[in-house]
Image (cartoon, rainbow, N blue to C red):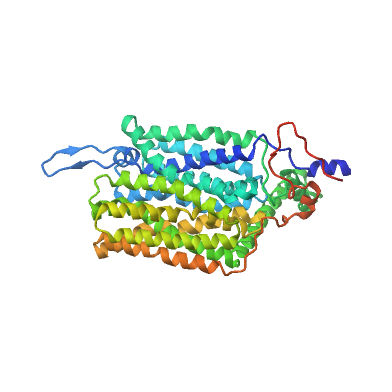
Amino acid sequence: MASSSTALLSPPKPSWFTPERLLVIFCVINLINYVDRGAIASNGVNGSRGSCSKSGTCTSGRGIQGDFNLSNFEDGVLSSAFMVGLLLACPIFASLAKSVNPFRLIGVGLSVWTVAVVGCGFSINFWSITVCRMLVGVGEASFISLAAPFIDDNAPPAKKTLWLGMFYMFIPTGYAAGYVYGGLVGDHFNWRYAFFGEAVLMLPFAVLGFVMKPLQLKGFAPAESTKALTSIETASLEVQDTDVSVVKGSMKSSKSKCAFVDLKQFSRFMKDLKVLLLDKVYVVNVIGYIIYNFVLGAYSYWGPKAGYSIYNMSNADLIFGGITIVCGIVGTLAGGYVLDLINSTISNAFKLLSAVTFAGAIFCFSAFCFKNMYPFLALFAIGELFVFATQAPVNFICLHCVKPSMRPISMAISTVAIHLFGDVPSSPLVGVLQDQTNNWRKTALILTSILFPAAVIWFIGIFLHSVDRFDEESEHPEVTTADGSNTTPLLDRKAAGTTETPAEP
């Protein structure tokens, strides 16, 4: 009996993944996600409406906007529709990670993403493509919530933030590549083929999430152990209503189980949310991140238009895209490397965040003060380097200020907050500001100055009492003690052929 119980609670054998392979796979998935975001905003895919001049000469529309005759408002709704699914699904996937293997959840999410992207290619009107874009957000939510904790688990201790930097550098890279990809496919074929191509690229990774042995996150009981705990907790529900017919009894038992599980998951989510909201380190970090993302979101949307207006840039899209991709890669990697170099602690992460944000704000603010384009470009590029250096440290804090089992919900709530209060409202608010000032230079200076409060808030974080909770026990110590999953590497770093040491009875 004891031997069968031990076998039931033992974790699965290590997958063929090495930490390096896992990082590469997650980076490619992240790249494809952001290629999709860039592609739908590109001229080749998004297109333009048909128009007629006063002389009576008419030009036909092209792309999504032309085919569906979308107004600018509808086009704006379409570009941000995926956010609805993303914001709703992130907390759900993060909560489910406590009862379903997180690696399998990523597989489910990527499958939804792939089907939804194909649906975008077959869409017939505004509403059909809008619904598909929302489902794209649902599919992306599982990956966003769970990928960073997996990377954090398996990165070498001395390179944790560098690995996070490698992962997050594909955000600007993916956006820029999406602009190019969407333009090429849309101009030479049809905008629908851009979505089909993305689905083909993502499909192998969706399948991989189901066919490979599931990986286990630190702080979570293995899938078999979770099933064992669940069966113990719900045993009383399986032996009720014995005096009723078998069919009727089984139906009542099933309903009771579903209600019990749903109520338990919701209660657990609310409990975790309360813990996060009472954690001063987490709250200060996310507030700074919201303010930072408010500025970056408006930069990405209004930057080319402001550059064209202030400096008469004929190729503003190309210039701002080039600066973003180069500074995004170099800055993000540099931020992770520097934090590892000075010792990756939460306090040091706050120091780095406040320093680079303050420096970036000074350079970007100074850039918009110059009337000549070339000093502007030089100073703005330096400012962007500093600004992008925040990506690895800010996510390092989100992952390490909470216990391991809460990292998915930590990343999910952070993602929801920075979008809901950051980049989603920033673009329309900056548009209103520009309508009032009618001066892009003044608008850009006001927007850039908002980075200074972000630096101040992160500076406050330096003085908060912080504890790195990465090595804290999981919420099921009785399980993790038996299988040792909390004290051994999740992925096999040894050479092929090395065998595991069996757990002591």
**419 displayed left or right of 242:** left
**260 displayed left or right of 451:** right
Name the quadrant containing residue 17: top right
- Residue 405 place in picture, x, y as percent: 66, 54
User: In terms of depth relative to the viewer, which is nearer, 142 or 25?
Assistant: 25
Residue 169 appears in the rendering: yes
User: In terms of depth relative to the viewer, which is nearer, 369 or 499?
Assistant: 369
Residue at the farthest right position: 1
Name the quadrant containing residue 410: bottom right
**Quarter holding the N terminus?**
top right
Residue 124 appears in the rendering: no
Name the quadrant containing residue 5: top right
The correct choice, above or below, for 364 with respect to 501 in the image is: below
**277 displayed left or right of 124:** right
- Residue 366 place in picture, x, y as percent: 33, 61
Residue at the farthest front position: 341
- Residue 395 place in picture, x, y as percent: 55, 55
User: In terms of depth relative to the viewer, which is nearer, 31 or 111?
Assistant: 31
**449 displayed left or right of 481:** left
The correct choice, above or below, for 272 with respect to 499 in the image is: below
Residue at the farthest top position: 189
The correct choice, above or below, for 169 with respect to 369 in the image is: above
Tell me what residue is drawn at x 55 percent, y 42 percent. Answer: 109
- Residue 353 place in picture, x, y as percent: 50, 60
Residue at the farthest left position: 55
Tell me what residue is drawn at x 24 percent, y 53 percent. Answer: 311
Tell me what residue is drawn at x 35 percent, y 38 percent. Answer: 45
